[in-house]
Amino acid sequence: MVKLYDSGVWLVNGRDIVEDGPEAAAAIGQMTGSTAVSREEASKETMAYSILEKHNTSGNMDDLQIKFDKLTSHDITFVGIIQTARASGLEKFPIPYVLTNCHNSLCAVGGTINEDDHMFGLTCAKKYGGMYVPPHQAVIHQFAREMLAGAGKMILGSDSHTRYGALGTMAMGEGGPELVKQLLNKTYDIRRPEVVAVYLTGKPIPGVGPQDVALAIIGAVFANGYVKNKVMEFVGPGVQNLSADFRIGVDVMTTETTCLSSIWVTDDAIKDFYEIHNRPEEYKEMQPGAVAYYDGMVYVDLDQVRPMIAMPFHPSNTYTIEELNANLMDILDDVEKKAQISLDGKIPFTLKDKVRDGKLYVEQGIIAGCAGGGFENICDAADILKGASIGSDAFTLSVYPASTPIYVELAKNGVLATLMQTGAVVKTAFCGPCFGAGDTPANNALSIRHSTRNFPNREGSKIQNGQISSVALMDARSIAATAANKGYLTAATDFDVKYTKPRYFFDKTIYENRVFDSKGVADPDTEIQFGPNIKDWPEMCALTENLLLKVVSEIHDPVTTTDELIPSGETSSFRSNPLKLAEFALSRKDPDYVPLAKEIQLAEKARETGACPITGAAFLEPVWMKIKAEFPNVDRNTTGIGSTIFAVKPGDGSAREQAASCQKVLGGWANIANEYATKRYRSNLINWGMLPFLIEKGELPFKKGDFIFIPQIRKAIEEKWSEVNAYTVGDTMKEFTLKLGELTDDEREIILKGCLINYYRG
């Protein structure tokens, strides 16, 4: 089904694969009738290279400084981004910037604060010259596909699933500070990423959908980091056998592989997509060069893909549905063991009670958002469900079309009626089921969803309150088959269905009548509308000469998601209030974190204001005595006091900057990790002035509650040291090494200044 190559791969004429090695040059020469090219020259023949080269402003293709064509944000990210940019000197949006309202759409938490954020967005779009998409019109990524994408373009979004590669657009999801840089005419700075080919061959069998293909790929590449921080380039003869919607459905899930971005070859199916959406000028054919070199290859035989399921609690925890049903109790036992690692054993968890007469019963089905809410997914699901009933037991089915134009077309062609006659509920465009703000299952319930993630805590669980529910990811077709079977897990391939494949007609007047578009013209006289929950960022001081850090959380899960660092769901309503939101940091993972971080932060605030003695910080005196004994010349006034966390591999998942900024607001100076799950989380740490320390795997020289002293940290950043000596302060001063990893000159300066806002203030 999926094969990973152990070495680099040459692709000749977009179809023929040659593994790298001593024989490669001769084989390529025989195929092309020309002399062999070098790996470096052939690597320039990828589509990814050509797009990056077009957008690079550095003049050096090894160290990229990218300027994007367009920006996108939604209503739990744009307030913080614009507030940061305003504090840094924003006057107008220099490129098209679209503000959608698809996350905090329900306005159900915190009184007026959600709608206050929406009005903030509308008035900012007017003042600075942007676009504003009102709630329930479209989820962020569907609007971008319909109205923003263009072949050969680059889009940066403050949502991790910013992926439009199937349309020929290289798109990246990053934390808010990276968008701030673009708004201030700065660049996105990275080393040139490696490019991995995803070679598709064959054709999916009826009943297999895009989520099935995506989960098969994720299951093969996530754990081994095969495409981590790389670009996935989709090529091969199988691409032509996939519709535009199918490609989009696979592409959006590439985020769950931890890749940097994605790009696909384009053809008549994508040309047709742009024509349907009244933007034919945005299409161009894209193919790799005659001889292209890739740093690896994921080979996918589409003929062999079968309906898949990603069991709790990660999209990479994959099985075929057939395999799960055939080995139900054994697999559920394995799922429970893995779950206890994620749940820290804090709550009983089982799925075995879902087994009825040897079959797995689920309580909820959801088809929604940027992954599931596409036109073709919903139409195929309706074909499976036509004439059926979802039953009157616990099982429910909700369907969320990804945009109002899709919703309208489903109404016109009768699909909505087909779905609703079965007992399903069709709702408006909303991302809530994907991040825990809509259709939260009952306690101990199992939900199957065609959405993007199934992390613990994400779907609305509150483990600290004894509440737990589970999400498994599936394709819309198998969700529909399960619904037709009244909640018993069923693969779509078990149904003999004639798929009608109705043609899609896009109605642009829906957006013309409702979406605010400044056409890039700013109105500086517009007064921004603030709600009482919208607060400025607190002042943040520059990096001090030395650091004294207290370890206030220690996480040994194999991977720590951003949902565990700052929960989603109702907490999202407070993302325009940094201080209020910070109260939720790690609340579902380590409830001790906030009070411990605040305790040490008091000492730092006293230091910054020159208070002496440091109020409420007598516990530091023994620590200072130990430090002074070893470092008699250390000055307390130039030694910052703060907190740090250790996690094995933090930052998987969302692009949300708040996973880092909440730590900073509470006095965090650093993270210490064996590795960082994503580039975007590490970038978020840096942009908030936090040190992204690395430590070798093995026994830790510190534990939760210990103090770590790091002398000369400012000098280390200024002089570009690759590592620093640190000391655990106990009965003795135990020395160990912290690595800094690769930092650009700008990143070093941001850390020295204390955060991105300070950096731009000068």
Image (spheres, helix red, strand yellow):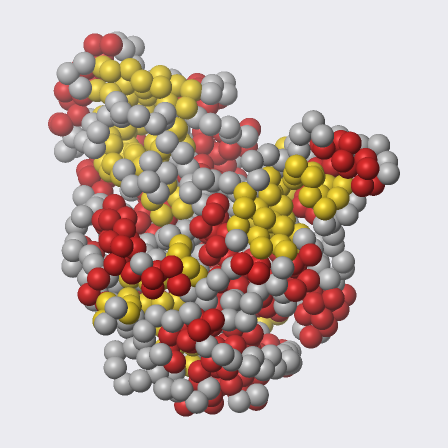
Residue 544 point in image, percent of width and height:
37, 25
Q: Is residue 408 left or right of residue 552?
A: right
Q: Residue furthest front?
A: 326
Residue nearer the viewer, 326 or 78: 326
Residue 463 point in image, percent of width and height:
20, 56
The residue at the point 35 percent across, 43 percent down is 559
Q: Is residue 15 above or below residue 507?
A: above
Q: Quadrant of residue 393?
A: bottom left
Q: Is residue 199 above or below residue 275?
A: above
Residue 539 point in image, percent of width and height:
37, 41
Q: Is residue 269 left or right of residue 536?
A: right
Q: Does the image show residue 329?
A: yes
Residue 631 point in image, percent of width and height:
27, 11
Residue nearer the viewer, 495 or 174: 495
Q: Is residue 679 left or right of residue 25?
A: left
Q: Is residue 538 above or below residue 239?
A: above
The residue at the point 30 percent across, 34 percent down is 646
The residue at the point 63 percent across, 68 percent down is 243
Residue nearer the viewer, 529 or 170: 170
Q: Is residue 153 above or below residue 488?
A: above
The residue at the point 42 percent across, 76 percent down is 480
| Total numbered labels | 0
Q: Does the image show residue 522?
A: no
